[in-house]
Amino acid sequence: MERQVALELKNICKYFPGKVMANKNVNLTLYKGEILSLLGENGSGKTTLMNTISGIYAPDEGQIFIDGKEVVIKSPKDAYLYKIGMIHQHFKLVDIFSAAENIILGVKEKGSLKNVNTRVREIAERYGFDIDPKKKIYEMSVSEKQTVEIIKVLYRGADILILDEPTAVLTPQETEKLFAVLRKMKEDGKSIIIITHKLNEVLAISDRVSILRKGEYVGTVDTAKTNQKDLTEMMVGKKVELKIDRPKTEFDRPLLEIRNLCINSDDGNVAIDDASFYIRGGEILGVAGIAGCGQKELCEAIAGLRPIKSGLIMHKGENIIGLPPRTIIEKGVSMSFIPEDRLGMGLAPSFSITDNMMLKTYGEGKGPFVDRKSARERANALIKRLEIVTPSSETPVRKLSGGNVQKVLVGREIEAGPNVIITAYPVRGLDINSSYVIYDILNEQKKKGTGVLFIGEDLDVMLALCDKIMVLCHGKVMGIVHAEKTTKEQLGLMMTGSLDLTEEKKDKNLGFAKDSNLTEEEWKSEEERQEKEATDGRS
């Protein structure tokens, strides 16, 4: 039986000012009742192509066919007329409105809000969503907000749905619920395109996979007939070794001990509530949690960029909170911070790579002049070492792709020679090739004895990369576990507060590694005990 085509793209081209090619002669077919994954490296044109389908951009060349008929889509309104809806990674909701009010925004709705609530519940029941139409957006979790966005396009009658990185901020349990919903939608005849960098999810949910490389269409394969290695090679155009190392190191004593830390968020609410843990040399400590559970505030507080309500940050028995950065360095703590907001907080977007390399050293030279020559040499060495794609070291970083921007930021921070690295979502939005470059850099630092605090969202990566993982739920520490001895499912339960290990002394199944406030003398015997437990567990 011949499959019905829902959407077909023929020779789609899109150019931006300066003759920058985003898409070139892209051909793509989406069938009715299928889930198609769209893969490609950063800058390969995935989002541009989907924005073209959803009416945010108009194609410069090429044709779009819906149900076999050529259509012209010049706006999101046009896209809705052809029953196309896109769920963006960054939600477009009004916080003070209810779910139902957000869903009917922009719709010429007849009838009362009560009727809208009834219709929303019908859609939710049909596909297996869990939603309260009357609940305000600001009261919702990330997964609930995503549900509102999906129902919003279904309410408008969408038969073709496009989801951009839909699982980026979901727990494993929430991801499974989403996938169950998508499968029901597929059974109902809906056609779905998913943009994601998570290859394990691609293989789990999609029927076929289409790949773009440098703006051009590479090919489409049946998911059942491919694997992560083959997909990666199609994306990057060469053989790639998909393996995250976790080198063994001789764990040093704590570089920093965080004791009973309490931090407020920008709105004055509690972001971190009584957190205690160590950052140790030669170890990567992962921090897992649903988005908004205090990860951002924790990073900024340790880096000295956010006030601390109470608690201590100890180094060799001395509290370093409030000390000037130069004094902290003199005491033996050289810290680098790789923030979540790479362009807003980490780099100066309009500055060149060379000038951004100098940001950490301005004012350290002798006299009124800066040494731009050596900064340019360091920038060019970094470009070569990390294979940063850029016209030159004088190119403003805002003109680089996301992966190359992140390489500049990470490279600059590593070049400073830190012994403590605080990094928040260092591979968010990066393609698999760029991600592995970042993992390798962090492991190199770990082998040098650097302590790394790694805030992450991909639990598969954290389980492979980190030595231990601390889990946060609503700002509270649920426990610290050995990565080798736990699972994604157990981490997910901790992230939602369903499993709290903080009262436990140990849990052999989870490899519990709870750090407590020990004296310098007590620490050594405690470390030996924990490492013995880990060794016994592995054997």
Image (spheres, helix red, strand yellow):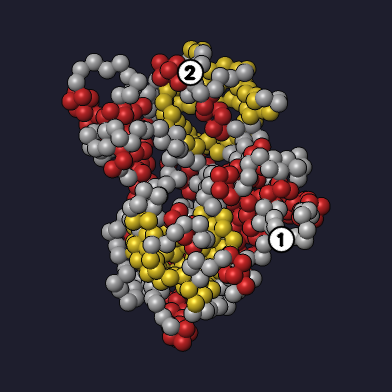
Can you identify the residue that label 1 sits on? 364
Residue beneath the point at 35% across and 52% down: 268
Residue beneath the point at 33% across and 24% down: 105
Residue beneath the point at 37% across and 33% down: 93
Q: Quadrant of residue 398?
A: top right
Residue 477 as seen in the image, left or right of residue 225:
left
Circle 2 Cα neighbour tier, 10 Å, few/some/many (<14 / 14–19 / ≥20): some
Residue 388, position in %: x, y?
A: 70, 47
* Mark 1, secondary structure of its residue: loop
Circle 1 Cα neighbour tier, 10 Å, few/some/many (<14 / 14–19 / ≥20): few
Residue 4 visible in this rendered orientation of the protein = no
Q: How many discs mark residues in the rendered view? A: 2
Specify the amino acid type for callout 1. Glu
* Mark 2, secondary structure of its residue: loop
Q: Nearer the viewer, residue 62 or 187?
A: 62
* Cα separation between marks 2 and 1: 52 Å
Q: Nearer the viewer, residue 286 or 373?
A: 373
Q: Is residue 270 above or below residue 285?
A: above
Residue 529, position in %: x, y?
A: 43, 83
Q: Is residue 536 above or below residue 229?
A: below
Residue beneath the point at 69% across and 55% down: 362
Can you identify the residue that label 2 sits on? 75
Residue 469, position in %: x, y?
A: 44, 64
Residue 188 as seen in the image, left or right of residue 281:
left
Specify the amino acid type for callout 2. Ser
Q: Is residue 514 above or below residue 292?
A: below
